Structure formats: C-alpha cells, structure tokens
Amino acid sequence: MHFYRSHTCAQLTKDNVGEIVRLSGWVHRVRDHGGVLFIDLRDHYGMTQVLADPDSPVFSQVESVRSEWCIRIDGEVKARDEGLVNPKIPTGEVEVFIRDIEVLGAAEELPLMVFGDQEYPEETRLRYRYLDLRREGLHDNIMLRSHVVASMRRRMWEIGFTEFQTPIITASSPEGARDFLVPSRLHPGRFYALPQAPQQFKQLTMVAGFDKYFQIAPCFRDEDPRADRSPTDFYQLDVEMSFVTQQDIFDTVQPVLAGVFEEFGQGRRVDTDWPQISYADAALWYGTDKPDLRNPLKMQVVSEHFRGSGFAIFAKLLEQEGTEIRAIPAPTGGSRKFCDRMNAFAQKEGLPGMGYIFWREKDGEMEAAGPLAKNIGPERTEAIRQQLGLGVGDAAFFLGGKPSAFQVVAGKARDEIGRELKLTETDRFAFAWIVDFPLYERDDETGEVDFEHNPFSMPQGGMAALEGDPLEVKGFQYDLSCNGYEVLSGAIRNHQPDLMFKAFEIAGYSREEVERRFGGLATAFKYGAPPHGGCAAGIDRIVMLLADEANIREVIMFPMNQRAEDLMMGAPSVPDNAQLRELSLRVIEPE
C-alpha cells in the first residue's frame, strides 16, 4: 500500500465495500454521536466520512484530533445504512471504519474556520490565505481559473496560434498606468521595468514573421485597487496577428471567448450576437464604455423639449455651450415612491438630484405627474413620453449639464433602475464590442493633448486624419464589454514609421523621445513591418464573471489587499542597507 494513501477522498464507492484502504487529508469536521466519532476527511478532491467507536484500537487517538489537523487513516470500507446515504457527495454511500491513524500535521487554534460559511475580515483572510484557500468556495474558484486557462490555451492552439513567452524585465512603456521599476545592480542609477503588458514584444514578434501569437501573460501595473482590478499584477490572454483587419480580430476572438463562457457558465445563456457600438453611442446610451446590455434601458437626448421651457434650471443650462439634457426611461417605475428613491440615489452620488416625470391613470385618462411635468406643461411631457416610448405606470429621469459632469452618475442610475425594476437579466452573458475610440484627449487642467487609450493604435484615415483636429481622430481601437465589465482591449497597430512619429508628435513626444523610449519598435518598423493587430483579454475578470463574484480577489490565489500589501508574506518590505548599497540606492523617507 502507498505510504500515504491508496485512494483520494473522492474515490470510494460501494464497489470498495470490504476493502482495507488508506486515506490522507484534513479533518474538516468532527462529530460525536453518542460515543461514536465521525470525521469528515477532506483532501483536494473531495470528502469521505470516516468513523471510530470505542471498539476501534485507536479510538483514544481519534478523540484527540481537531479541525484542520492533517492525518492519515487506515480502515475498512463499509456501506452506509440506506437512510444515512449522502447523495450530495460521490462517496456518500460509504464510510470508513478507522483501524489505524497517524497525525501528519497538528493544527493550532485556527484564526479562521474552514468549515461553515462564516464571514471573516479581508485582513484575516489574506493574512492566512492558505487556510482561506481550503474553504470550498474559494478552492472551487481557483480550480475554475485553472480550467479556464487550460481551455483558452487549447482553443488558441486549435485555431493555429502558437504560444511564445516575452520578457518580464524590460524597459518602461506608456500603457496608461505607473510602472513597477527594478533597479539595475550592474548599471547604477538605471532601472528596468516590469511590463504593463507585452505590447511592444508581441508587435516585434509580428515584425519577426511569426504570424499568430498568443500568451497567458503576466502584467504588472502600479494601480489603485478596485473591486474588479488587482493593484499589482494580473494575467491576460494576449493575442497578436499579422495581415488582419479589425473585423478579423473580432471573428477570431469571439468563438474562443464564447466557447469559454459556454463551457464554464453553468448553463447561463451566452449571447451570440455581439453588437459593435461606437464609443460615442455607448457614452450617450449607457453612460459608460463598458455597458451592461442585460439591462435594456437606453438613455436619450431630450434637450429640445426643455429649451425655453418653464423649468428654469434646465432651460438656463441649455443656454450654455456644450450642455444637454438626457432622459433615462424607467418602464414600470411610475410611482412617486420609486422616483423619490432614485432622486435620493443621485444625491448620494454627488448630484443635486434627478428630475422625473411619471405617468399615471386619472379619471380614465393618462396624466403626467411630478414637478417637471407641472413646469413644462402637457404638450412637452407628451412629446417626451412618445420619444421614450413610455405609457401608464412608467417614469423617466432627467439629468442635465455638460455630459462629462453627469455621464458617470447617469450610467450608474441606469444600472440601478434596471436592478430595482428587475429589468436586468441575471442568467445571461451579454457582450458588446465598443469601437471608434478617440485617439486623443485634452487634459482639463493643462489643456494639452495626449493619447486617450493606446498610443500604438492605427488612426482611422491615416496621415490625412492627423492633419486635422486631433480630438476628432478615431483609432482602430476596441474594447469588449460583458455584463458591465471590460474584459478585453485591443487595436490595429500603427506600423508605419512616419505615421507613428506624427501620432506621437501630436501627443507631445518629439521624434528623439520616441526613439529613446521605443527605439526597438520604431527601428523595427523601418525593416518591412506587416500590418498587424491584436488584443488582450483579462483572465482574472473573466473568471470573476464566471464564478459570479463581485470582487476580483475571490478568484486570485494570493492577492494583495486594497493597499497593495501582501499581509501573508510581508510585502512590500524594507530592504537592508547592504542591498541598497549594492544597488547604489538611498531611501528618502516621506515628510
């Protein structure tokens, strides 16, 4: 017999009754039923019930074990009485009568219990993550992640892609976040960077003539943490292809991701129609570039109905340049109670409130009600109702001003209305390609133009587009949203040297600076670069959606906390003086 086990804790069935077996695992739970001790013994694979009564030669030793002790037992497999069968587990028809036991690893008093569903502070969970990982839900999430990655790899190989590895220590590159810098011992005063993405290397792979690249790539960004973002590192399915258009990328990636969601979505519907929505339309209709299309609500501009109206707040707003009034339709939301609740929601989000109109039946006729309706009159309210396609029992909410000031809150309000009125489906994965991103944006404080998204993207219209207003230039850039999260981002690359230098010049980068910072890429493009493009899909976020979790830390094995600290390993740590001297560094304490 094997030194530690003849079977796992998920293997034994009625076919094994009468056999002498050896199991090893953790004590999940101990139950004393009138002198008979029952132990749920757990390993990576599952659970087996083992027991000892006073006739067992090791009963006194079994009495001493506690939760999460790691033990080995030898015993005889017996069939459970018919009324005691547990159909929820594969081993539920049998139990093992303990003949011998060995404690492989005793456990001290536990800082968190593995058995049960008790909630613990995140600090405790992360400090003792190895215990947290023993809990069934988190263990299942991590296994789901592994299977998703394996499925992605298999699907990419099946459609002709080859996996390559790119460097982890490299040069700094602008990807929209801060770099993690690594001091060089051999070159004092100079620094490497951990890659925010394999962007330049995968493009160079295309220049080198490898046609279809992919990688399960680690990426490192010094970002502020959010529920859907890891503050230090994350993994992505990184893809690049040569001789492709934007549509080719979409047609290649959609079956891969749809297949993964169908395989691991636990029966939830996966949309097959992935609409392509312009960035401008997404902002207008949904208030975000990552819309949740499970919610059918679309915002509309209704400025004309308020221009010169009796509602002075909106009427005066519309006299200012760049302002507009948007409406959020709310089918079935036509009650004053619901309208007041949504008004309070807007106030919590930092706005003065939201105007509203709701339609009700009065004396056999439809009537528009609410403060706005009284101020603008029946003719205008009827025009609004018809534009929004609403009727009795429905409502509409209104926000006004410069879109940049209220758009985010409007998007949140749309989501909240969809949830509150149960309009948003919960058993579906709804995807949308967001396209036609602006290539540049103007900094509100400095007034300077910079890249809005990815600096290596091909401008739509080529060099001619770059000769006009930079804020009007669209890029061949795209995101994929799913259920309100961005799960993929990509672009067709700017592979023409003159076009690349011009694009960077508009964003304030001189030719010399581009060659200094991106010399490898800029030089490579002079030697016959093919048209190419690609994307990267966030693995952590995809698994978060599949696992139906709201926090990305629930699908990462050893995540940082919200302050980018590893409480378990004590990172970041203070280097000793010898290390600093070797790296020619000195730490200046913050004031």
Image (cartoon, rainbow, N blue to C red):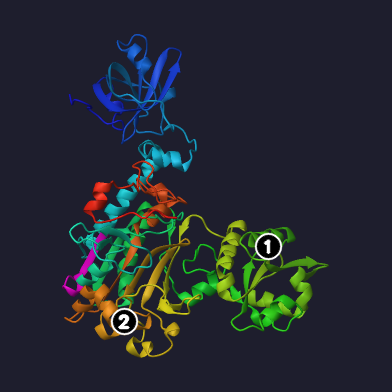
Decide whether residue 378 is among the magenta residues. no
**Between 520 and 329, the one nearer to me in the picture:** 520
Q: CA distance from mark 2 to mark 1?
A: 49 Å
Indicate whether residue 206 is drawn in magenta: yes
Residue type highlighted by circle 2: Ser
Quarter of the image containing the N terminus? Answer: top left
Asked if one can make out residue 436 in the rendered structure from this viewpoint, the answer is: no
Q: Amino acid at mark 1?
A: Asn
Can you name the residue that lies furthest to the right here? 363
The quadrant holding residue 398 is bottom right
Which residue is at a point 30% across and 49% down the rendered structure image? 146
Q: Can you say whether 127 is above or below 399 in the image?
A: above
Determine which residue is flagged by label 1. Answer: 343
Q: Which mark is residue 510?
A: 2
Quarter of the image containing the C terminus? Answer: bottom left
Foreground tag (2 vs 1)? 2
Q: Which of the 4 quarters of the picture holds residue 177?
A: bottom left
Q: Nearer the viewer, residue 571 or 57?
A: 571
Q: Position of residue 218 (x, y in %)?
A: 29, 57
Q: Residue at x 45, y 83 (%)?
A: 471
Q: Secondary structure at mark 2?
A: loop
Percent from the top left, x then y, of residue 533? 28, 74
How many C-alpha atoms fall within 10 Å of the one at disc 2: few (<14), some, or many (≥20)? some
Numbered label tally: 2
126, 339: nearer the viewer: 126
As drawn, 476 above or below 114? below
Query: Is residue 389 found left or right of 548 in the rendered image?
Result: right
For residue 371, side relative to residue 332 (left or right): right
Q: Is residue 127 left or right of residue 286?
A: left
What range is drawn magenta here? 205-216
Residue that lies at the very extreme toward the top in this rendered image: 55
